Image (cartoon, grey):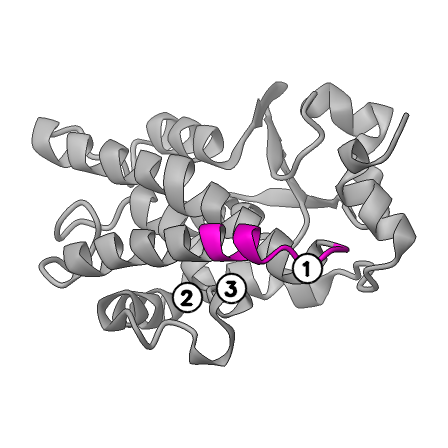
Amino acid sequence: MLKLYYHPTPNSTKVAVLLEELDLPYQVVTVDIMKGEQHSEAFRKVNPNAKVPAITDDGVNVFDSHAILIYLAEKHEKFLPLETVARAATLSWLEFVASGLSPFSGQAAHFLHYSPEDIPYAKNRYLREVERHYRVLDERLANSNFLAGEEYTIADIALFGWAASAAFVFGEKGLTDYPHVARFVETMNARPAVVRALELKSKHAFKGELDDQARRAMFPQNYAA
């Protein structure tokens, strides 16, 4: 059975959504990143980069959320169009999330919530880039139901992973400045597969306290060897 190595992060959510959309049987293997379980020898054999998510599928290890999305979509021939124009749009928006929204959102969240120091420049830099990316996405979704057009694809699943937790960056206002992205998230939240994927978080227990152990587990590079 396929194994999903999971912690309730935006990137893990992407893969869980696709697995549910594909209606594939899978086993959840929890990796508590706040306890440092991602650094275990066993997990590093699956992902040498010690990050979630990862999967093991018929003896094949795949890591990085977007690599997993492409791998599963190609293998099962769903959610990645074959027609040239739609496929190009899907891959373009998928990589827009991978190289832009995802890392800038992660860095904004880090400096807003996890940094032991208040660094205004860093917070402003990453927050403004997240806002810029959402403006691009909002303009796109003003003209189509989904990122690649009218067809639901892995690009939408990739966006949902981060857009569903946008309040962690934007606070109480959430996506109110981006009404078309907000509409998209509402549409996604109504999908049964998305509901099931989001329920994984409540079905498993994870460390919640951001103490010194968690900081060292999540950001070991910040500490001297």
Residue in view at x 57 percent, y 47 percent: 12
| Viewer can see residue 13 | no
Is 129 displayed left or right of 10 in the figure?
left
Q: What is the spatial separation of the Cα atoms under label 3 and label 2, in whole angstroms? A: 26 Å
Label 2, on which residue?
192
Give the secondary structure at mark 2: helix
Is 200 displayed left or right of 78 in the figure?
right
Residue in view at x 24 percent, y 34 percent: 92
Of the two numbered discs 3 and 2 in the rendering, the one whose residue sits closer to the viewer: 3
Q: Amino acid at mark 3?
A: Val
**Is 195 covered by the magenta stretch?**
no
Between discs 3 and 1, the one toward the N terminus: 1
Above-or-below relation of 145 to 61: below
Residue in view at x 46 percent, y 64 percent: 166
- Is residue 138 or residue 4 the one in the foreground? 138
The mark found on residue 65 in the picture is: none
- Is residue 23 or residue 135 the one in the foreground? 135
Q: What is the spatial separation of the Cα atoms under label 3 and label 1, in whole angstroms? A: 15 Å
Name the quadrant of the C terminus: top right
| Viewer can see residue 215 | yes
Q: Which residues are magenta?
A: 116-125
Q: Amino acid at mark 1?
A: Asp
The image shows a total of numbered marks equal to: 3
The image quadrant of residue 192 is bottom left
Give the secondary structure at mark 3: helix
